[in-house]
Image (cartoon, coloured by chain):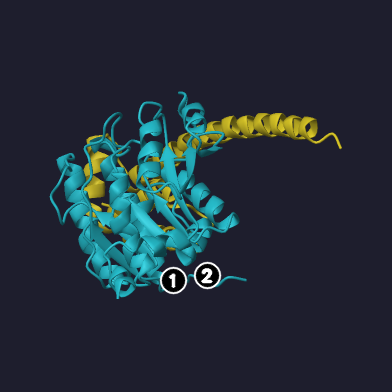
Amino acid sequence: MTPFRVSIAAGAAAIILLLVIFELIRSRRLQERYALLWLLTGIVILILSAWRGALSRLADLVGIAYPPSALFVLASLFVLVVLLHYSTVISKLSDQNRILAQRLALLEHELKNKDPD
Amino acid sequence: MAEAAQRVAPAPEPELARRRRLAIVPAFNEENTIERVIEEIRTFDPGFEIVVVDDGSIDRTAFVAERAGAHVLRLPFNLGIGGAVQAGYQFARDYGFDLAVQVDGDGQHDAREIAALVEPILDGRADMVVGTRFATGGGYRGTRVRRVGIHLFAALVSLLVRQRVTDTTSGFRAVNRKGIRLFAIEYPPDYPEVEATVVLSRHHLRMVEVPVVMRIRETGSSSITALRSVYYMVKVLLALFIGLFRRYSTELEEP
């Protein structure tokens, strides 16, 4: 079984994470679409730290002897998924950035040629 | 006497003619329908200026729209319906339009219904008017998930804006100058219609729904497929929830 102190610490960390995300969205420093994965991470960790039986069963299922390790593994997995998601977001942004630069250059050229006087 | 009778006519044409009016037509790969949409708006009222916002189409949408005589804003890449429509509102604000009507580029909105849509604004009863599909039962079909979503949001938004709202996802809308100023600055990016209604209410602007008949879309499919509906619902629910804790301070009075 998970030691109580681990459950409490993990639960507290998850709550703090959720509150920080909430405030970031509210103050518009984080868009909803990029917050969803983080929220899911926080909620799953919160659930598993409160529902200790489920964590034990999950650890058992994948052969982890010490249940808190399962919590750790799960959190790492979520972070991996978030990182991968951000990689796709960055790829899209750099694509759009290139297109913007190209359009700007074409536009500048067009403006210069239109206004000789 | 005749003049007085004219003034109470249901569609006060002279009132409409006094306003500088703009039709905002968001279009994503609509080369087959965009020309007809433009012509329909012209037929309804030649006094409407039309701006087509080409949301990064890879077909000839922008070319066809320009040939048909519309203003065309060609976005450098696909921003999604929210970003596209907002560009239209910025155009309306910057060129000083009094009234803006949103009409989809896919032909599902019947331009003749614009008369009903602008009436509450001309009467000074509303800052935004939404054409709703449900009061008439005409011409709308959708996936089951989408219908459930529509009703869920209708109930939730009605609660949030303390007014009965039946069709929160309708993109057939008209706004006055205040609405134009608001949406030019504050318009949700992804799936905007639900949130836009709430944002409007939080700025103390008045919304009125009018029943309209919509056509089954002619080409293309809804931007909201069954699979993405869940993501859509979660995202909008989150946005609505957090919106409750936001303070809005967009200045809507003219400078």
Count residues near mark 2 (Cα–Cα under 10 Å), then give few for <14, some for 14-19, many for 20+. some
Q: Mark 2: which amino acid?
A: Leu
Instruction: State which quadrant residue B34 falls in.
Output: top left
Count residues near mark 1 (Cα–Cα under 10 Å), then give few for <14, some for 14-19, many for 20+. some
Residue furthest toward the right?
Answer: A117
**Where does the image place residue A5, in percent across and percent down from the top left?**
36, 61
**Where does the image place residue B98, in percent across and percent down from the top left?**
49, 61
Which residue is tagged 2? B252
In this rendering, which labeled residue sits more in front, label 1 or label 2?
2
Question: Against B55, is B9 above or below?
Answer: below
Q: Residue at x 79, y 33 (%)?
A: A112
Question: Against B132, is B230 above or below?
Answer: above
**Where does the image place residue B123, in percent across and percent down from the top left?**
35, 70
Q: Nearer the viewer, residue B121 or B187?
A: B121
Question: Mark 2: which secondary structure?
Answer: loop
**Where does the image place residue B186, in percent across and percent down from the top left?**
49, 59
Q: Mark 1: which amino acid?
A: His
Which chain has been coloured cyan in this picture?
B
Instruction: State which quadrant residue B174 falls in.
Output: bottom left
Instruction: State which quadrant residue A77 falls in.
Output: top left
Q: Is residue B148 visible?
A: yes
Which residue is tagged 1? B203
Which chain has been coloured yellow in this picture?
A
Quadrant, the C terminus of chain A: top right
Q: Nearer the viewer, residue B4 or A7?
A: B4
Query: Of label 1 and label 2, which has the lower sequence position?
Result: 1
Q: Nearer the viewer, residue B57 or B91?
A: B91
Given the image, what chain letter belongs to the residue carrying mark 1?
A: B
